[in-house]
Amino acid sequence: NTVRSDLGLEPVNPVVLNFVYVAESEAEAEEGAVQYGQEYWTSTMLHYKWMDTARYDKIGGYDFYTGLAKALEGTKAEESRAQILRNNLWGTPDQVIEKIEALHQASTASEIGASFQYGSMPYEVARKQIQLFGEKVLPVVQKFADLPPRVHASR
């Protein structure tokens, strides 16, 4: 928002993008979030060759990605699983509502972009999630009140 302020514009709330896996049972949601989340991240890391940090360091401007690659280097399967579960919206509809509310409060996000199909997830699995999300989660989270944007101290 500092950049917006420098341009004479009002601050805005962020938009947060997240992977979602919603299911009737917590066990099913956890299993799906981990399986498809790990597949997605593995394919992304391989596609962009993020582990080749020297390559990106030469280019410059990719500090986030090289930092991520360095942090993930040598990560064990259980650590990877825990990270996916910490950083994504998954669970029963009530659990996903709670997680979205916590994310909303922490970030003041006015919008949350949700990715329902990732990794090798079949279309039918994604469709089932979207339907459940639309029926049980969306009507609740759409009622969350907008929060005022957080304005950070200027440089």
Image: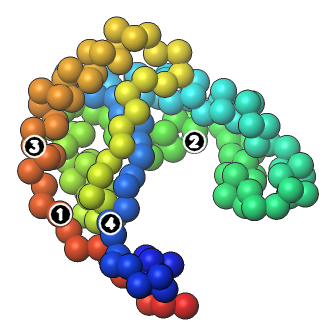
Label whose residue precedes the other's in the sequence (1 or 4): 4
Measured Cα–Cα span from mark 3 to mark 4: 20 Å
Q: Quadrant of residue 128?
A: top left
Q: In the rendered structure, which amino acid carries the disc numbered 2? A: Glu
When the figure is inspected, residue 46 is found, relative to residue 59, above or below; the finding is above
Quadrant location of the N terminus in the rendered image: bottom left
Check contact, mark 1 vs mark 4: CB within 8 A.
yes
Nearer mark to the viewer, of 1 and 3: 1
Measured Cα–Cα span from mark 2 to mark 1: 34 Å
When the figure is inspected, residue 32 is found, relative to residue 95, above or below; the finding is above
Label 3 environment density (alpha carbons within 10 Å; few <14, some 14–19, many ≥20): some
Residue under label 1: 146
Residue under label 3: 140
Quadrant location of the C terminus in the rendered image: bottom right
Residue under label 2: 79
Measured Cα–Cα span from mark 1 to mark 4: 9 Å
Q: Secondary structure at mark 4?
A: loop
Tag of residue 13: 4
Q: In the rendered structure, which amino acid carries the disc numbered 1? A: Asp
Nearer mark to the viewer, of 2 and 1: 1
Q: Secondary structure at mark 2?
A: helix
Label whose residue precedes the other's in the sequence (2 or 4): 4
Q: In the rendered structure, which amino acid carries the disc numbered 4? A: Asn
Taking 8 as reference, is 95 left or right?
Answer: left
The residue that appears at 40% across and 33% down in the rendered structure is: 115
Measured Cα–Cα span from mark 2 to mark 4: 31 Å
Q: In the rendered structure, which amino acid carries the disc numbered 3? A: Val
Nearer mark to the viewer, of 3 and 2: 3
